[in-house]
């Protein structure tokens, strides 16, 4: 069977070149006579994979020296707890912005360990925009401010990073890390589950400013303490070896196609093809306030909802899969992460046009 274009919100597509390289190295990784999955992590071969992955990631993301890059497990969801455990410290309170389901989960977890202040929310309009934010809204004594930079379910993203002054900014970047340029220096912590833009699930990447490490609450389990992993360069215990190996291949692919600038341009182009079509159609409708539209997740509805099932069925037959929207928004959602080729987006728009022609 031919490969499909997978519009899933995650896990999602990986670059074909990466899969091919992994396939070619599956049985014998670079003359070691074994696959990376079988390899001890305490070997020079594996060390060159994990440290190599870190180095390429630092290069493509522009991570300064005074930040640790950690390769952890537990998904972005475990960071909802690790962030407060590691950062609350003596201040015991934090500010959060609520832009949807993932923010809410982070808020709920934060409340288990400290006082959470929700300073802004877009819940009144089912999270189809990013609330206006100004520096004065934040508590100067908060341990940190938490945002979700891209809201996977609703298809919104921040167009400007909030200025939090001296209070560290923490961002859940799971669904848009490495999709557009971010200045890492503006953040205290950035975290992302790998399965959207970085590689396979099972790996979570955390970028944390070094001065924020080592202040975990007393009862923090060893495995949930950033210091544990920072001191051991993500090898305190067995890391998710194979996921890190694939992530390294993704990072190298990313670097070789021109890095963040080239990727951002490509993503803007891909998203524009889809949004332009939606804006000119009466048959389909985008659901997000245009100013806050995501480059990665594009939700839209069919104005005639009764056609939803047929749309999904015919799309699947055309090799365009996982277009069903999240139940809290309804309709469709096309997730067009870094690894989605521009041809996949063009093919989707062609399909949407012909479906519109046949059903209007
Ligand atoms: C997918 C997603 C999560 C959950 O990630 P897991 O790795 O499954 O825990 C959290 N936040 C955002 C923004 C996401 O898109």
Image (cartoon, rainbow, N blue to C red):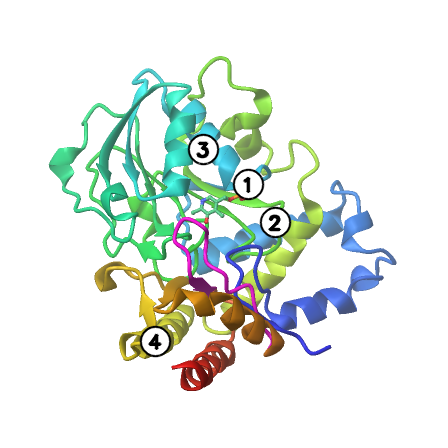
Q: Nearer the viewer, mark 4 or mark 1?
A: 4
Query: Of all residues shown, which one is farthest toward the top?
Result: 218
Q: Earlier in the sequence, mark 3 or mark 1?
A: 1
**Residue highlighted by disc 1:** 75
Instruction: Give the vertical position of 119 relative to 4 (above or below).
Output: above
Looking at the image, is mark 1 or mark 2 earlier in the sequence? Answer: 1
- The stretch in magenta equals 319-335
The answer to whether mark 1 and mark 2 are in CB contact below 8 A is yes
Residue 99 falls in image quadrant: top left
Which of the pair 73/283 is nearer the observer? 283
| N-terminal-most mark, 4 or 2 | 2
Gap in angstroms between the C-alphas marked 4 and 3: 39 Å
Mark 2 highlights which residue? 201
Residue occupying image coordinates x 59% and y 79%:
318
Q: CA distance from mark 1 to mark 2?
A: 8 Å
**Which of the numbered marks, if any, corresponds to residue 283?**
4
Place residue 199 in its image quadrant: bottom right
Which comes before the other along the chain, label 4 or label 3?
3
From this viewpoint, is residue 275 visible?
yes
Badge 3 crowding class, 10 Å Cα cut-off, few under 14, some 14 to 19, many 20 or more, is many
**Which residue lies under the disc numbered 3?**
80
Real-space Cα separation, disc 4 to disc 2, in angstroms:
36 Å
In the image, the residue with mark 3 has its CB under 8 Å from the nearest atom of ligand 1: yes
Q: Nearer the viewer, residue 31 or 267?
A: 267
Observer-side mark, 4 or 2, equals: 4
């Amino acid at each position: 069977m031919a490969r499909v274009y997978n519009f899933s919100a995650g896990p999602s597509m990986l670059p074909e070149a990466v899969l091919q390289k992994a396939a070619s190295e599956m049985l014998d990784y670079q003359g070691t006579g074994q696959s990376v999955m079988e390899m001890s992590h305490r070997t020079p071969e594996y060390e060159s994979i994990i440290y190599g992955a870190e180095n390429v990631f630092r290069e493509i993301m522009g991570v300064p020296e005074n930040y640790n890059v950690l390769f952890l497990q537990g998904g972005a969801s475990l960071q909802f707890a690790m962030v407060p455990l590691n950062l609350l410290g003596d201040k015991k309170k934090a500010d959060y912005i609520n832009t949807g389901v993932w923010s809410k989960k982070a808020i709920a977890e934060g409340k288990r360990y400290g006082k959470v202040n929700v300073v802004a929310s877009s819940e009144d309009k089912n999270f189809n925009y990013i609330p206006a934010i100004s520096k004065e809204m934040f508590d100067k004594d908060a341990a940190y401010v938490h945002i979700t930079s891209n809201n996977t379910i609703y298809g919104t993203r921040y167009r400007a990073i909030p200025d939090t002054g001296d209070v560290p900014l923490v961002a859940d970047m799971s669904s848009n890390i490495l999709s557009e340029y971010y200045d890492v220096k503006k953040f205290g912590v950035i975290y992302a589950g790998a399965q959207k833009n970085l590689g396979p699930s099972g790996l979570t990447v955390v970028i944390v400013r070094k001065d924020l490490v080592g202040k975990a609450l007393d009862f923090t389990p060893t495995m949930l303490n950033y210091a544990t992993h920072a001191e051991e360069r993500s090898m305190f215990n067995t890391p998710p070896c194979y996921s890190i190996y694939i992530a390294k291949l993704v990072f190298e692919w990313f670097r070789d196609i021109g890095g963040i600038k080239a990727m951002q341009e490509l993503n803007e182009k891909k998203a524009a093809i889809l949004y332009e079509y939606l804006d000119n159609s009466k048959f389909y409708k985008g659901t997000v306030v245009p100013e806050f539209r995501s480059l990665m997740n594009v939700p839209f509805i069919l104005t005639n909802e009764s056609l939803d099932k047929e749309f999904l069925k015919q799309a699947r037959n055309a090799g365009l899969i996982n277009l069903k929207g999240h139940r809290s928004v309804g309709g469709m959602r096309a997730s067009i992460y870094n690894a989605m080729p521009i041809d996949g987006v063009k093919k989707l728009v062609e399909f949407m046009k012909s479906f519109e022609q046949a059903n209007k």
